[in-house]
Image (cartoon, helix red, strand yellow):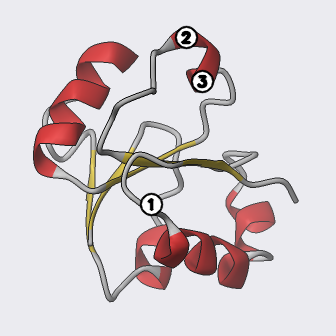
Amino acid sequence: MKILFDQGTPVPLRQTLASHTVSTAYEMGWQGLDNGALLQAAEAAFEVFITTDQNLRYQQTLTGRRLAILVLPTTSWPKIQAHLAEVGAAVNGLLPGQLRELTF
């Protein structure tokens, strides 16, 4: 799967998702895009968007999108690192257009 990390998604998570192609918004040159434009750009090139933006579902219309979105509960790498198996399973289980918010 092609995965895009939003700003704030810890880059070391990329190693856990080594079986996927992972890029960051910064690497794509999209760091200046607002959430709506970023989601539109991501949907054209990626299958999964991983973010730590807890308010994304309230700020954007997500209905009808093909892009699967995974929302992590924190930007803290040590906290995420303690739940890598859960994050990996969530990514692998995402369906097109699905929004999944992890809590841990």
For the point 21% across and 39% down, the residue is 43
Name the outermost residue toward the right.
104
Q: Are marks 1 and 3 in contact (CB under 8 Å)?
A: no
Q: Nearer the viewer, mark 2 or mark 1?
A: 2
Q: Secondary structure at mark 3?
A: helix
- In the rendered structure, the answer to whether residue 83 lies left or right of residue 46 reads right
What residue would you read off at disc 3?
Answer: 57
The picture places residue 61, in percent across and down from the top left corner, at 45, 16
- Establish if 53 lies above or below 52: above
Give me the C-alpha separation between circle 2 and circle 1: 24 Å
Answer with the quarter of the image where residue 29 lies.
Answer: top left
Left or right position of 85 against 70: right
The quadrant of the picture occupied by the C terminus is bottom right
**Residue under pointer 2:** 59
* Residue 48 drawn at (x, y percent): 36, 55
Cα distance between the residues tagged 1 and 3: 22 Å
Kindly indicate whether the residue at mark 3 contacts the one at mark 2 (C-beta within 8 angstroms).
yes
Residue identified by numbered label 1: 11
Mark 2: amino acid: Gln
Image coordinates for residue 18, horizontal then vertical, percent: 35, 85
Q: Is 47 situated left or right of 49 in this image?
A: left
Give the mark nearest the N terminus, 1 or 3.
1
**Which one is nearer the viewer's eye here, 66 or 89?**
66
Residue type at tag 3? Arg
Residue 52 in the image: state x and y as whole percent.
61, 40
